[in-house]
Image: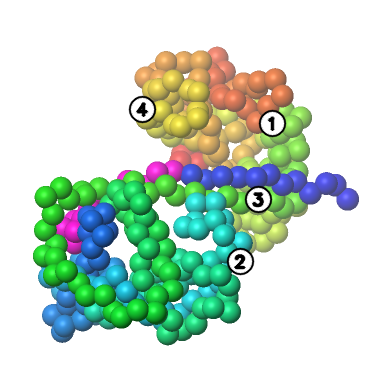
């Protein structure tokens, strides 16, 4: 049995968004150690606040301060914290209904063990020492046996409000390809491109998935395609990607390899970006030790006729 292929993969990007008046006030309040909710037309106080009532869809703007103390409504123990989570030691994820609020806020509870956590537990906010206007300004919750705290009566108006946030999004996982993709990757290591033909519609899919996405039937017949192909559509990239040593602008294209029934992605090089065109005939360029083509360059052939690739757009 061949070795099972697997590889660690990371998807990561900074998510940037601007804030409306409600979210701006909420996050600015956290920076100032003030928790703000929003009041609905029927008198409920929502924390965290939203801009529209989830029941009536009415616009909400009536800010109201709630207390930094509250009650656990439900919880789950996290015995193995992951990087980037609020605490580095085991903790509980909790939903806390702050005093004065009608909804619950999700955050971490610093507790010595799961036997010390329960629904109904009284807690309070532990504020972060350095606060910037983010939900992480609440470092965590901690058990609390004192009286309910009193709101200060803050109006929700701040001299220097937070107007935008950047949230890093990251997903770490291990990818394991199936039979069809393993064969495709092993062929690429030999500088060949292999797809699979559907026994029903007879299209050759590259890269293969083990089944035809159109007919829904299993595929097994391997077909070598390319190495040359035709640019079907393309875009000009003007924003430099993080950790990618390619000068902008450059062209990224759909390339229909000869014999394939599906276009794949590839970067176009060896030609000025403003000379790339639909129908351009290209060939792969490999680098030493690479498991896939580094880019595609003009093959020196006449452009393909539109009718030969129009079904692959």
Q: Residues within 10 Å of mark 1 (few under 14, many from 20)?
A: some
Residue 174, numbered circle:
3
**Within 10 Å of the Cα at label 2, are there few (<14), some (14-19), or many (20+) other Cα atoms?**
few
Residue shown at the point (32%, 54%) measured from the top left: 134
Which region is colored magenta?
13-26
**Of the image marks 4 and 2, the number of the one nearer the N terminus:** 2
Percent from the top left, x then y, of residue 110? 48, 66
- Say whether disc 4 or disc 1 marks the residue closer to the N-terminus: 4
SS label for mark 4? loop
Lower position in the chain sequence, tag 3 or tag 4: 3
Marks 2 and 3, how far apart at CA: 21 Å
Q: Earlier in the sequence, mark 1 or mark 2?
A: 2
Question: 10 Å neighbourhood of mark 3: few (<14), some, or many (≥20)?
Answer: few
Nearer the observer, 211 or 39? 39
Q: Which mark is residue 291?
A: 1
Please tell me whether mark 1 or mark 2 is closer to you in this view. 2
Give residue 133's position: percent from left, percent from top. 28, 52
Q: Position of residue 245 (x, y in %)?
A: 50, 23
Q: Element under label 3?
A: strand
In the displayed image of the protein, which residue is found farthest to the right?
1
Q: For the residues marked 1 and 2, what is the alpha-carbon distance in whole angstroms?
A: 39 Å
Q: Vertically, is 233 above or below 38?
A: above
Q: Calculate the distance from the C-alpha at mark 3 to the C-alpha at mark 1.
A: 18 Å
Q: Name the image colouring.
A: rainbow
Q: Nearer the viewer, mark 3 or mark 4?
A: 3
180 and 61: which is toward the camera: 61
Task: State the separation of the CA atoms marked 4 and 1.
Answer: 26 Å
Q: Nearer the viewer, mark 2 or mark 3?
A: 2
User: As displayed, is residue 247 above or below residue 153?
Assistant: above
Q: Which residue is mark 2?
A: 79
Sequence order check, earlier mark of 2 and 3: 2
In the image, which is nearer the foreground, mark 3 or mark 1? Answer: 3
């Amino acid at each position: 049995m061949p070795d099972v292929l697997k590889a660690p993969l990371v998807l990561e990007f900074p998510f940037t968004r601007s804030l409306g008046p409600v979210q701006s006030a909420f996050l600015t309040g956290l920076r100032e150690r003030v928790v703000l909710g929003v009041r609905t037309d029927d008198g409920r106080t929502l924390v965290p606040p939203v801009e529209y009532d989830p029941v009536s869809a009415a616009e909400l703007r009536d800010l109201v301060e709630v207390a930094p103390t509250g009650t656990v409504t439900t919880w789950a123990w996290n015995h193995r914290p992951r990087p980037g989570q609020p605490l580095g030691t085991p903790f509980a994820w909790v939903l806390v209904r702050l005093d004065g609020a009608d909804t619950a806020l999700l955050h971490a509870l610093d507790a010595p063990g799961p036997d010390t956590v329960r629904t109904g537990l009284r807690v309070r906010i532990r504020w972060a020492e350095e606060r910037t206007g983010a939900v992480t300004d609440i470092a965590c919750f901690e058990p609390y046996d004192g009286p309910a705290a009193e709101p200060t009566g803050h109006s929700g108006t701040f001299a220097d409000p937070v107007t935008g946030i950047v949230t890093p999004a990251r997903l770490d996982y291990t990818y394991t390809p199936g039979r069809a993709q393993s064969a495709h990757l092993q062929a690429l290591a030999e500088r060949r491109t292999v797809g699979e033909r559907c026994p029903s519609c007879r299209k050759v899919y590259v890269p293969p998935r083990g089944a035809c996405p159109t007919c829904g039937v299993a595929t097994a017949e391997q077909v070598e395609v390319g190495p040359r192909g035709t640019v079907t559509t393309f875009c000009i990239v003007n924003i430099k990607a993080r950790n990618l040593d390619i000068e902008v602008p450059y062209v990224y294209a759909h390339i229909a390899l000869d014999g394939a029934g599906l276009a794949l992605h590839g970067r176009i090089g060896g030609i000025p970006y403003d000379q790339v065109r639909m129908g351009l005939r290209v060939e792969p360029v490999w680098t030493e030790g690479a498991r896939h083509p580094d880019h595609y360059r003009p093959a020196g052939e006449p452009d393909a006729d539109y009718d030969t690739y129009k079904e692959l757009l």
